[in-house]
């Protein structure tokens, strides 16, 4: 998992997909957890949320410690293609932090309907 602390970046198996108007200044934060994901630092910069695209009908959400690179899986979400849909249906998790780092939210179709799920997070003061 590679991140540029000032640009939009998504980590992919083929390499990093970067949109930046300045030269890349990247550092490896963690070894990652699988195919492509959305990465977002917490407002205090101590943690990062990372998600995966669907693998075998599941999406994974993980918490990464920015200082150590330790990665902790925090949840799995069901993401299966409905049989009656003729096209690919995708709902990326797009994890987000509350401004005080006490809550995270994700988009998901885990219960069969598209929705926003909010969770308490006990990592606001962790390093």
Image (cartoon, rainbow, N blue to C red):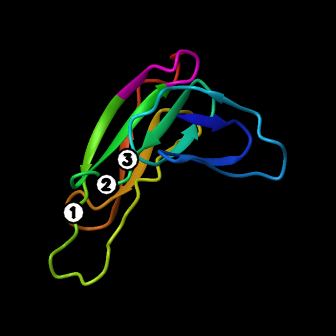
> Quick check: marks 3 and 2 in contact, CB under 8 Å?
no
Q: Which numbered disc covers residue 118?
A: 3
Mark 1–mark 3 contact, CB under 8 Å? Answer: no
Asked if the residue at tag 2 contacts the one at tag 1, i.e. Cβ–Cβ closer than 8 Å, the answer is yes
Q: Secondary structure under badge 1?
A: loop
Q: Earlier in the sequence, mark 3 or mark 2?
A: 2
Where in the figure is residue 20, as x and y percent of width and height? 76, 51
Measure how far apart labels 1 and 3 are at the Cα level. Answer: 21 Å
Q: Which residues are magenta?
A: 65-72
* Mark in front: 1 vs 3: 1
Q: Residue 24, percent across and down?
A: 77, 40
Residue 115 percent coordinates (x, y):
33, 62
- Circle 2 is placed at which residue position? 54
Camera-near label (3 vs 2) is 2
* Res 122 → quadrant: top left
**Tag 1 residue:** 80
Q: Is residue 76 above or below residue 17?
A: above
**Viewer-side residue, 16 vs 96:** 16
- Cα distance between the residues tagged 1 and 2: 8 Å
């Amino acid at each position: 998992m590679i991140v540029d602390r000032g640009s939009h970046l998504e980590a992919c198996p083929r390499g990093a997909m970067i949109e930046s108007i300045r030269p890349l200044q990247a550092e490896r934060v963690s070894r990652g957890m699988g195919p492509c994901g959305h990465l977002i630092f917490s407002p205090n910069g101590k943690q990062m949320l990372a998600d995966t695209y669907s693998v075998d009908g599941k999406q994974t959400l993980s918490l990464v410690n920015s200082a150590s690179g330790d990665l902790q899986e925090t949840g799995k979400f069901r993401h299966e293609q409905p049989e009656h849909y003729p096209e690919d249906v995708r709902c990326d998790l797009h994890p987000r932090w509350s401004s005080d780092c006490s809550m995270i939210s994700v988009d998901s179709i885990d219960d069969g309907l598209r929705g926003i799920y909010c969770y308490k997070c006990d990592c606001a003061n962790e390093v």
